[in-house]
Image (tube, rainbow, N blue to C red):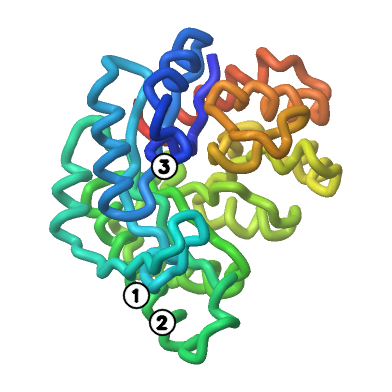
Amino acid sequence: MYIDTHTHINFNDFKEDGDQVIRKALSENVWMIIVGTDYKSSKKALNYANKYEKGVFAAVGLHPTALMDFYSTKTNRIIKAEEFNNDIYEKLASFDKVVAIGEIGLDYYYLDRRDDVEAQKKKQKDVFIKQLILARRLNLPVIIHCRQAHDDMLKVLSSFRREYKDLMPQQKCWGVIHCFSGDEDLAWRYFNLGLMISFTGVITFSNQWDDLIRKAPLEKIMIETDSPFLAPEPFRGKRNEPILVKYIAQHIADIKNLSVERIAEATTHNAKMFFNI
């Protein structure tokens, strides 16, 4: 059994065949967490999860890039920024099939093209912290996105963990850095904050993460596709799907010199404990 801990079946890439993709994965014993990035996609993730008796769950949250106007090359139009509304996300998160707040975090990748960089960084941090607070109040883990912002991310998480230490779980991790692409030092800094890391298909493109994967404790890692993006080899460049999470597990098994069954068992256990499913 495998659990794809981060997929976007709720995106338009799966508009025509989302349910077919889900059923194909479930038939191969692959469960999934469908992750929202704004209100519309979060609601759609929940709608998908509610359609299936087991194996499909949702995460709801507001992605940092959704906080600013964005030009879509696919639709040739401006996508307007969304303002964070705690009440509507809390209402979504109250449903049983919602197992996390996410994906939330910091993303500075596009900010160098703007003239209000510091204001945008502050806005991202403020909304991120509000969603961290929401997650702790609801006793839900967080799925964290971080792109070109790890220094600020570590500062925010360290400060938050100190300020809200009474709300922090004592026996389990409270968040995961999804699509982790940092080095071993960065991974351990996140581990020391009570977080896990999750690997995508990017680890099959390059050997730069081999040492980290070899040394990372099995109990601290999960696997994900981030589909429709980042399809693993030999499917690179094609639309990714939850069923391809098996290739990520196999790659980790090869690096750690363990059986793929062992990796499947460990990452599935980690995901079930983390998401309380």
Residue 49 x, y percent position in the rendering:
29, 28
C-alpha separation, residue under disc 3 versus residue under disc 1: 26 Å
Residues under numbered marks 2 and 1 in contact, where contact means CB atoms less than 8 Å apart? yes
Tell me the residue at 44%/49% (across/down): 143
**Residue 199 place in picture, x, y as percent:** 64, 40
Residue at which label 2 appears = 122
Badge 1 marks a residue whose secondary structure is: helix
Q: Tag 1 or tag 3, which sits nearer the N-term?
A: 3
- Eye-nearest disc, 2 or 3: 3
Q: Is residue 62 left or right of residue 158?
A: left
Location of mark 1 (residue): 126
Q: Nearer the viewer, residue 182 or 51?
A: 51
Residue 157 visible in image: no
**Measured Cα–Cα span from mark 2 to mark 1:** 6 Å
Q: Residue at x 54, y 38 (%)?
A: 228
- View extreme (top): residue: 27
- The amino acid type, in three-letter code, at marker 3 is Phe
Mark 1 belongs to which amino acid? Asp
Q: Which residue is mark 3?
A: 11
Q: Give amino acid for label 2.
A: Lys
Q: SS at mark 3?
A: loop
Give me the residue at 25% from left, 57% from top.
134
Q: Is residue 78 visible?
A: yes
What distance separates the C-alpha of mark 2 from that of mark 3?
28 Å
Q: Position of residue 96 (x, y in %)?
A: 20, 31
